[in-house]
Amino acid sequence: MNAPVTAVLRRVDRGLIGLAGLLLVVLGGAVLAAALDLPVPSWWPWSGPGDVLLTAADRRRWRAEGWWWPTVIAALGIVVLLALWWFLAQFRRGRLAEVLVDTGDGDAAVLRGRALADVLEADAAAQEGVAQAKVALTGRRTAPRTRVALLLEPYASPAEALTGLGGEALARARASAGLAALPTEARLRAVRHRARRVN
């Protein structure tokens, strides 16, 4: 998912959260005002503590209709699926689909983000003491950023792994894509292993 789409989704997300919050505050406040017998607008359907949200006639109105329950269940199912999709979308971080490479003749070439990430992963994993590497490209097409997760062998030195990542893998990626800078967030983790016994 590229940066402009991510930005639009972020704005839509914030707008929906704000709208839902405002609606809940207004409705909750109005119902609370009616329950406390405070003055409410004349058009408001509940005007006092004795009023109910749905009368018995309203609750039983559509029960005899054959379409009522399937419609209610389908509508609630759609609401649940949309809420689940929105919830899972909060954990997805936008990945960069492509990077613009300056060709030096005033034009630009497009490099697939996945290809650059794969090469960077292979370079990082080839370092001494690195068991596995995962790379994700984020940011803008003209100013990409990377998130690197390194899984280190028990004997590996974190300082050496970071030096190798910055001085070799990232430097090659930066040079090959013609980037002035490639800001990187690196996370290091050690492989789980049993403690050795010393006799």
Image (spheres, rainbow, N blue to C red):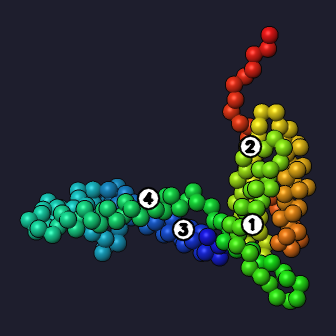
Q: In this rendered view, identify the residue nearer to me: 48 or 88.
A: 88
N-terminal of the two: label 4 or label 2?
4
Residue for badge 4:
84
Q: Quadrant of residue 69?
A: bottom left
Residue drawn at the location 39% of the way across and 62% of the way down: 81
- Under circle 2, the secondary element is strand
Q: Residue at the left extreme?
A: 64
Q: Quadrant of residue 96?
A: bottom right
Residue for badge 3:
13
CA gap between label 3 and label 4 equals: 14 Å
Q: Disc 1 or disc 4, which is closer to the eye?
A: 1
Q: Alpha-carbon neighbours of circle 4 within 10 Å: few (<14), some, or many (≥20)? A: few
- Under circle 3, the secondary element is helix
**Amino acid at dot 4:** Leu
Establish if 104 lies above or below 184.
below
Q: Disc 4 or disc 2, which is closer to the eye?
A: 2
Q: Which mark is residue 131?
A: 2
Check the picture and name the quadrant holding the N terminus.
Answer: bottom right
- Circles 1 and 4: CB atoms closer than 8 Å: no
Q: Disc 3 or disc 1, which is closer to the eye?
A: 1
Q: Residue at the bottom extreme?
A: 106
**Amino acid at dot 2:** Ala
- Under circle 4, the secondary element is helix
Residue drawn at the location 54% of the way across and 72% of the way down: 12
**Amino acid at dot 1:** Leu
Q: In this rendered view, identify the residue nearer to me: 72 or 55.
A: 72
